[in-house]
């Protein structure tokens, strides 16, 4: 090939390489065209192009042609030889005949001579291109210069193609970010918002796995709320102390945390998932609203990956949208709860009016019944159970009369009379009142009294109303032949002595989803229930400086514990 033909071949190769920027082509396809053009221009019997992986800094073969495509020719050894030297020094290098030097080993048994030139863009080596021949001494210094010119043009072209790809990726990410924002703001419930987040993150970040952790109310731990991208994540749970992982650092210091290789760190979160799914790199981004931490959003890749500034910026923007969506969802749920409280208040107001009218209607016939009962002058012998029944009927009539007056006096200030009461006697009286009712379902009632006298200060009628409500609730829940167990004891609570009454049954239990609401007014787990029983119990106990707590509830039964302060000595 004469000089004129060589110049023409060089110009044609340069044109073919530079024209790649006008085509819709990816870097892999462009690399294949480049090695073919360079090999043809230099009359080489083989060529390859290797690029520096920005995530690990190592050379990776992108394209080959000629000798290096043959099945019996091993790929170039990128950790040694001319290619590594050219990459490290940023200069072209050539060996005219490997048989006459021991400085470098030939890249394969068939290669006798080789030239390599770095791909340099903006003073950074992005890769290397190498050409080779089966025979030695087939090129001169002019050929090395030509390879340098071709490698410079190849680097420019590849950089432009990558730039276009990056711009296209950013455009897609921005589009996905906009779609994610619209999708998130269209969700209302917190659960619905949380389920949406991982999918949107994976669309934007092009990663394998996404996980969302929310900060606990005390600000000391992170709890996994939702994750997506791997089968292992189904029903996966995790709770982390802020001090135990990089996720806590992201929350505490309000900054993104990147871990290039989870396998080489002592990061203790997501270990089973990282191992089973082969996750390598992670980017954790804090979620905060008005500078208050909410949680952390993480993405994970299957290969070692260095997240660039654009990716970090887009992920931070998504975390901002997530923070707003979570805050809006929480406010929405608070509004719904407030509306429910207003509706209950309206129902209670209406109920109050109806109750007042009913109390007026009850008062007159109740007065007549009391007078007639007293006129009967029923006096049974001592030891006759009917004598006790008569006493209880008289007490209940007085209690009803007191309730009627209390309803009619509702809204007036003043305390109801409190006296020193023996809790043991109150419980036994309530058991007597319900014995016939429990006998209808053959319910076995047991009572374990305290070894000592337990006295409290309270209103007898109101406290008995508590016991009756609890017994009747248990009656509704317990099956035929079931059991109700009551016990009385004393304990120190907050350094003050208190009476503790425990009600336990083997009924069907209270569904978990409504357990938090059982003491709310107008809330009932039964269709026929009015939702006032336990609300009245709690209200009466509060007026007596006591409390009631649901200790456990399951299909095997329910246990409620109420406490009342003991009466002062001599009170």
Image (cartoon, rainbow, N blue to C red):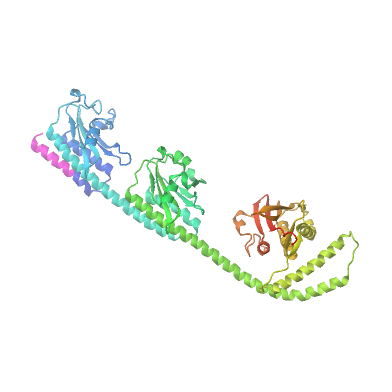
Residue 477: image x %, image y %?
Answer: 70, 56
Residue situated in front as seen by the camera: 8 or 438 = 438
Q: Position of residue 383 (x, y in %)?
A: 89, 59
Q: Nearer the viewer, residue 132 or 321?
A: 321
Indicate the position of residue 135 as horizontal and vertical percent values. Answer: 18, 26
Q: Residue at x 43, y 39 (%)?
A: 266
Residue 535 lies within the magenta run = no
Q: Nearer the viewer, residue 126 or 161?
A: 126
Would you identify the image quadrant in which residue 18 lies?
A: top left
Q: Image quadrant for the C terminus? A: bottom right
Question: In this view of the protein, can residue 64 be seen by the observer?
Answer: yes
Closer-to-camera residue (385/496)? 496
What quarter of the picture does the N terminus occupy? top left
- In the displayed structure image, the side of residue 537 where residue 67 appears, left or right: left
**Magenta stretch, residue numbers:** 1-16
**Can residue 6 be found in the magenta stretch?**
yes
Residue 507 makes an appearance in the image: no
């Amino acid at each position: 090939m004469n000089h004129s033909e060589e110049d023409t071949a060089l110009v044609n190769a340069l044109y073919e390489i530079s024209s790649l920027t006008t085509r819709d082509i990816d870097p892999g396809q462009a690399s294949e065209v480049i090695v073919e053009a360079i090999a043809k221009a230099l009359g080489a019997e083989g060529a390859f192009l290797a690029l520096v992986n920005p995530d690990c800094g190592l050379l990776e073969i992108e394209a080959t042609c000629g000798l290096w495509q043959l099945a019996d020719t091993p790929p170039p050894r990128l950790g040694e030889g001319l290619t590594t030297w050219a990459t490290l020094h940023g200069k072209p290098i050539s060996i005219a005949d490997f048989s006459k030097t021991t400085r470098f080993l030939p890249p394969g048994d068939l290669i006798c001579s080789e030239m390599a030139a770095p791909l340099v863009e903006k003073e950074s080596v992005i890769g290397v291109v190498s050409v080779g021949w089966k025979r030695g001494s087939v090129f001169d210094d002019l050929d090395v210069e030509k390879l340098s010119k071709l490698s410079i043009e190849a680097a420019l072209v590849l950089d432009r193609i990558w730039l276009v790809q990056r711009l296209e990726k950013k455009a897609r990410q921005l589009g996905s970010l906009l779609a994610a924002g619209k999708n998130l703001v269209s969700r209302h419930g917190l659960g619905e918002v949380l389920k949406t987040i991982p999918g949107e993150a994976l669309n934007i970040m092009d990663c394998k796995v996404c996980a969302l952790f929310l900060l606990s109310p005390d600000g000391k731990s992170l709890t996994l709320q939702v994750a997506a991208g791997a089968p292992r994540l189904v029903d996966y749970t995790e709770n982390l102390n802020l001090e135990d992982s990089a996720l806590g650092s992201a929350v505490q210091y309000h900054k993104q945390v990147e871990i290039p290789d989870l396998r080489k760190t002592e990061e203790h979160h997501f270990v089973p998932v990282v191992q089973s799914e082969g996750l390598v790199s992670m980017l954790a981004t804090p979620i905060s609203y008005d500078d208050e931490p909410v949680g952390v959003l993480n993405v994970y890749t299957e290969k070692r990956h260095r997240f660039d500034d654009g990716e970090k910026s887009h992920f931070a923007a998504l975390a901002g949208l997530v923070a707003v969506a979570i805050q809006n969802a929480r406010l929405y749920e608070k509004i719904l709860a407030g509306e429910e409280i207003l509706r209950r208040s309206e129902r209670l107001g209406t109920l109050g009016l109806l109750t007042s009218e009913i109390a007026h209607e009850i008062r007159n016939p109740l007065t007549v019944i009391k007078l007639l009962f007293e006129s009967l002058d029923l006096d049974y012998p001592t030891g006759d159970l009917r004598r006790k029944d008569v006493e209880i009927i008289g007490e209940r009539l007085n209690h009803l009369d007191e309730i009627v007056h209390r309803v009619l006096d509702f809204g007036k200030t003043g305390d109801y009379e409190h006296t020193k009461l023996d809790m043991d006697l109150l419980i036994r009286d309530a058991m007597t009142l319900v014995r016939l009712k429990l006998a209808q379902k053959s319910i076995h009632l047991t009572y374990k009294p305290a070894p000592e006298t337990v006295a409290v200060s309270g209103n007898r009628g109101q406290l008995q109303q508590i016991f009756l409500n609890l017994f009747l609730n248990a009656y509704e829940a317990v099956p035929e032949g079931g059991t109700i167990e009551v016990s009385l004891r004393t304990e120190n609570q907050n350094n003050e002595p208190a009476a503790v009454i425990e009600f336990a049954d083997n009924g069907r239990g209270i569904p978990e989803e409504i357990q938090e609401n059982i003491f709310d007014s107008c809330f009932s787990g039964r269709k026929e229930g009015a939702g006032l029983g336990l609300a009245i119990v709690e209200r009466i106990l509060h007026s007596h400086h006591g409390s009631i707590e649901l200790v456990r509830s399951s299909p095997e039964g329910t246990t409620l514990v109420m406490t009342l302060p003991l009466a002062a000595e001599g009170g």
